[in-house]
Amino acid sequence: MSQVIIYSNLNGNVSVCVPTGELDIQTVLQKDCPAGAIIVDDATLPQGADAQFFDAWKLNGSTVTVDLEKARADKLAQFNAAAVQVAQKRQLNTLAGIANTPDDATFTTELTAGRAAIAAATTTAELVAIANPV
Amino acid sequence: MTTTINASTINGFVTTADTSGQLAIQANGTTVATAQSTGLNIASTGLVFSDSTTQTSGSGVAKAWVNFNGTATSGSATIRAFYNVSSVTINGTGLYTVNFTNAFADANYTTVGGASRYAYGTSSYGSNVHPENISSSQVYLQVGYEDTYSGPIALNSYYVGIAVFR
């Protein structure tokens, strides 16, 4: 089982320091990490869908949890960024006389449904299951 | 056979000669380098810089490098290979700190790096690696790309590589 060093960083998120093994982990703790950093087994860190929302990780004592509200906000930001790219591509298609698929009304409906699903998600697994616009 | 120059701990400076066209440099009988027509071969002990703590000699070679998976937070899954790197810290999406085992004398080194855009198997474009907040003991990296419409986008990259020269 591997061990890593974790601490709350200046952004309020969790930093995970992974030693290479060239130095022992206690030396890395002293040399590379701020005061208050702790050594944990990496298996105790969020796994699966939770691991995909790294920016929503919060350190409570020695336990890392996922802030679901922050995870929703991050997912919405990703969704919207993807939507902007697709919308730009669709606009170019229209100018070039290329038909968009799906049509504009369906695309708008899909965006609305995606945002509603993000707002209603109660787990990170549900958030992961919501596809970004393509 | 090889012509040798040996620094013996018993006999001092010892040489042997032949017509092989090769020259071996030995430290008390152990060959550390061999010069031959194809080039200079360094023994498996490698190049050892005299100032391993300050890393200021040997400016033609990388003084530190690492290849890591920026999408993982597991020790065994994160760092694939490295030299003179004690740890990699993941600070957020596309935000990494590479910590050096032996610090440099100053922060006036240069870095080269690259990264894949997405997870392995879904990559379409490469990403940029931006070094920031450089110090003698660590370098802070931002990985991402500039999207035409959305501006700078940070991302976790499956392959992140950086080499440091000084």
Image (cartoon, rainbow, N blue to C red):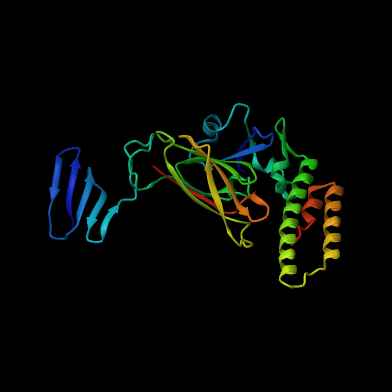
Q: Is residue A61 left or right of residue B131?
A: right
Residue B159 position within the rendered picture, expressed as x and y whole percent measured from the top left:
56, 54
Q: Is residue A19 left or right of residue A78?
A: left
Quadrant position of residue B7: top left
Q: Decide if residue B155 is in sight here.
A: no
| Residue in view at x 30 percent, y 51 percent | B42
Residue A32 position within the rendered picture, expressed as x and y whole percent measured from the top left:
54, 33
**B103 in relation to B1, above or below:** above
Q: Decide if residue B93 is in sight here.
A: yes
| Residue in view at x 74 percent, y 73 percent | A97
Q: Quadrant of the C terminus of chain A?
A: bottom right
Residue A112 position within the rendered picture, expressed as x and y whole percent measured from the top left:
85, 56
Return the residue nearer the eye: A2 or A105. A105
Quadrant position of residue B17: bottom left
Residue A125 position within the rendered picture, expressed as x and y whole percent measured from the top left:
79, 51
Quadrant position of residue B55: top left
Q: Is residue B132 left or right of residue A46?
A: left
| Residue in view at x 77 percent, y 39 percent | A67
Return the residue nearer the eye: B136 or A102. A102
Return the residue nearer the eye: A34 or A71. A71
Q: How many marks?
A: 0
Name the residue at the front extreme.
A95
Return the residue nearer the eye: B5 or A71. A71
Q: Quadrant of the N terminus of chain A?
A: top right
